[in-house]
Image: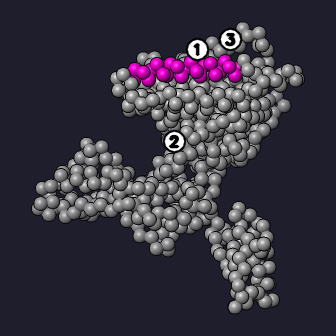
């Protein structure tokens, strides 16, 4: 049964900023839950799901940070009510990260075996990587350390036996790669479970605990069932997975009840492997790219969780790539649709498939939070249903993203005008050649058809089109097939752009003011995305221009003062006094970067304001 409790969130870690209620129309079977309420889910419990990526469990120190966060979340009150309901935590963990990542190392062994290379050094490196971590985590518990190391060594021996078969056959089967690559998650989940239990035992010895937190290791292959025949890359068999979830939960509750350490006040928490699953034939498989995040979202739906938090190494969803737009800011909230658009256009924080289970969850959609393991007090980004319609033109765009290294293909000719079936022939042949079309642009005159694809397929695309329209080219019905490369697609994303006038004007004016030529334009009827194709060498400048135009970061003005007489000193004091006001009122970041006391004197460079704070303007030492 599922019921709700009207309360206000009060987490030990700062909660995500509140947002305005929004309608849910795309998924009528799942309704949006009132934000000031929590609800019970699976087995009438309050569930929260937390997922930690490879960078979050890269070494022993990272494991300890993760344990701190999990314990804090498990113990912090769910509500501010005097009768606060107890919550259960479900943790999903990736394989150990670092350089190189465990999953990459495991896949490397399969490739080496297929080439009959020496896999022993790589297997030994994996052993040492985990052994070093265990020695650091359990210095005073050799029994637990040896138990975990024994599990890892036995698994690696099994992997070595599998690799012997691969070497004999010289065959790198995808099924074998999936089986071998999933072991990293098994090890990291067991290590984290052991660490949490160890810390819980130490605290129980020191003080009587009202609540006993029981952390249970859970192999995702026991409950996540994938129907690989349904669609490409498989689909979750929800009915079977829900049955398995119930069975697994009952089994673990029975074990907990029978345990000598069981307490009436025990609370069950799961620590589950990410990435791995089982197909409908009972064979081990994986969830492919970004599978661990997907695992967390699947588990969230199975548990009918109140939230899913993805802990990673960034503070949240950013308004642009910070490597290219230095003043990019974290977005407090975005909609599922906005997050999908940003992810498609290069934002790596969350994969679109991760959001699917959260969106389709019943009876309520599940919000997803993106937070930083290494800055756990930072609130991060909240991703939920449809975002607020903003009347403020500065806030209708939530972010900008780009796709690099593309080619623009332009097919031009009078024979394209008003002729049915031309588009079918064009894009049908491209599909046969396995060429993915990223963007399409066509004017109502139908004189030209322009599309974008990855630059590596540009030559093949040109040859394919010329072959398909060879007769039209001979009689000049199709005049030319031209390729422009390298290019980049710059995309503005925001639900608030719909029905808001002036957005396109500001977007293209910013590009024009920056002297950037737009090669092609595309926008869907949803008005959630405006895409422009520009030359690759101008893409960074284009991103910065549009980012500043919508005031997603401060506009920086650098000032030099010539002549430091009484008037110059007064000006300097005035600029310093008005600095905060210029930031808050006009989004202007004023930087006095140099002064020339006298026309014939040396330039005095001033201190740089790296963090954009309100420090006083001062001289370099």
Image-quadrant location for residue 267:
top right
Badge 1 element: helix
Of discs 1 and 3, which sits in the foreground? 3
164 drawn magenta:
yes
Label 1 CA crowd tier, 10 Å (few <14, some 14–19, many 20+): few
- Dot 3 crowding, Cα within 10 Å, few <14, some 14–19, many 20+: few
Residue at x 59%, y 37% (from the top left corner): 97
- Does the magenta-highlighted stretch encompass residue 21? no
Q: Quadrant of the N terminus?
A: top right
- Residue 114 location (% of width, % of height): 38, 29
Label 1 to label 3: alpha-carbon separation = 13 Å
The quarter holding residue 481 reads: bottom left
Q: Gap in Å between the C-alphas at discs 2 and 3?
A: 36 Å
| Kind of element beneath mark 3 | helix
- Mark 2, Cα crowd under 10 Å, few <14 / some 14-19 / many 20+, is many
Q: Earlier in the sequence, mark 1 or mark 3?
A: 1
In which quadrant is the C terminus drawn? Answer: bottom right
Q: Which residues are magenta?
A: 144-166
Instruction: Work out whether mark 1 precedes mark 2 in sequence or the reverse, and give the earlier one.
Output: 1
Residue closest to the eye, 320 or 188: 188
Q: Which mark is residue 351?
A: 2
Q: List the residue tagged with mark 1.
A: 247
Q: CA distance from mark 1 to mark 2?
A: 30 Å
Q: Tags 2 and 3 in contact by the CB under 8 Å rule?
A: no
Camera sees residue 6? no
Relative to 199, 490 lies left or right: left
Q: Position of residue 286 (x, y in %)?
A: 48, 28
> Residue 585, how many percent across, how many down?
70, 69
Q: Residue at x 52, y 49 (%)?
A: 347
Residue that label 3 marks: 255
């Amino acid at each position: 049964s599922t019921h709700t409790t009207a309360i206000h969130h009060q987490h030990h870690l700062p909660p995500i900023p509140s947002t305005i209620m929004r309608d849910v129309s795309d998924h009528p079977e799942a309704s949006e839950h009132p934000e000031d309420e929590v609800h019970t889910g699976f087995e009438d419990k309050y569930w929260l799901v937390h997922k930690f990526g490879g960078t979050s469990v890269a070494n022993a120190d990272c494991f300890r940070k993760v344990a701190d966060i999990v314990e804090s979340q498990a113990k912090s009150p769910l509500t501010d009510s005097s009768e606060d309901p107890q919550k259960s935590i479900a943790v999903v963990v990736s394989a150990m990260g670092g350089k190189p990542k465990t999953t990459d190392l495991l896949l490397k062994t399969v490739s080496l075996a297929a080439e009959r290379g020496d896999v022993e050094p790589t297997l030994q490196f994996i052993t040492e990587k985990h052994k070093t971590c265990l020695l650091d985590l359990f210095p005073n518990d050799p029994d637990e350390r040896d138990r975990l190391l024994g599990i890892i060594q036995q698994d690696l021996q099994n992997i070595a036996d599998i690799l012997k078969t691969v070497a004999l056959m010289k065959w790198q089967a995808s099924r074998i790669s999936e089986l071998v690559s999933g072991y990293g998650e098994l090890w990291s989940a067991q290590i984290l479970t052991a660490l949490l239990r160890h810390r819980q035992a130490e605290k129980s010895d020191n003080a009587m605990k009202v609540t006993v937190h029981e952390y249970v290791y859970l192999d995702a292959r026991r409950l996540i069932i994938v129907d690989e025949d349904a669609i490409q890359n498989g689909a979750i068999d929800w009915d079977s997975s829900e049955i398995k979830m119930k069975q697994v939960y009952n089994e673990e509750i029975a074990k907990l009840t029978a345990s000598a350490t069981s307490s009436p006040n025990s609370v069950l928490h799961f620590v589950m492997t990410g990435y791995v699953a089982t197909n409908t034939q009972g064979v081990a498989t994986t969830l492919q790219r970004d599978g661990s995040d997907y695992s967390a979202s699947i588990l969230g739906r199975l548990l009918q969780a109140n939230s899913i938090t993805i802990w990673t190494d960034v503070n949240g969803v950013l308004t642009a790539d910070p490597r290219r737009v230095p003043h990019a800011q974290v977005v407090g909230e975005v909609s599922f649709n906005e997050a999908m658009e940003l992810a498609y256009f290069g934002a790596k924080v969350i994969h679109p498939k991760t959001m699917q289970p959260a969106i389709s969850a019943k009876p309520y959609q599940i919000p997803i939070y993106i937070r930083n393991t290494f800055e756990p007090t930072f609130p991060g980004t909240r991703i939920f249903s449809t975002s607020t319609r903003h009347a403020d033109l500065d806030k209708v765009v939530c972010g900008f993203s780009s796709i690099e290294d593309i080619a623009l293909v332009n097919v031009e000719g009078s024979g394209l005008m008003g002729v049915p079936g031309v588009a079918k022939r064009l894009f049908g042949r491209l599909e046969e050649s396995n060429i993915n079309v990223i963007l399409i642009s066509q004017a109502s005159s139908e004189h030209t058809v322009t599309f974008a694809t990855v630059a590596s397929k540009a030559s093949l695309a040109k040859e394919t089109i010329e072959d398909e329209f060879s007769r039209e080219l001979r009689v000049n019905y199709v005049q030319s097939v031209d390729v422009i490369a390298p290019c980049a697609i710059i995309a503005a994303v925001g639900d608030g752009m719909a029905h808001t006038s002036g957005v396109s004007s500001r977007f293209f004016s910013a590009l024009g003011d920056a002297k950037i030529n737009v090669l092609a334009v595309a926008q869907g009827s949803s008005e959630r995305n405006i895409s422009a194709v520009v030359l690759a060498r101008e893409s960074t400048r284009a991103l910065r221009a549009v980012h500043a135009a919508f005031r997603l970061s401060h506009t920086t003005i650098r000032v030099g003062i010539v002549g430091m007489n009484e008037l110059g000193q007064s000006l300097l004091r005035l600029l310093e006094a008005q600095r905060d006001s210029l930031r808050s009122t006009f989004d202007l970041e004023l930087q006095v970067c140099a002064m020339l006391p006298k026309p014939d004197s040396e330039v005095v460079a001033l201190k740089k304001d790296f963090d954009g704070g309100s420090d006083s303007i001062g001289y370099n030492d």
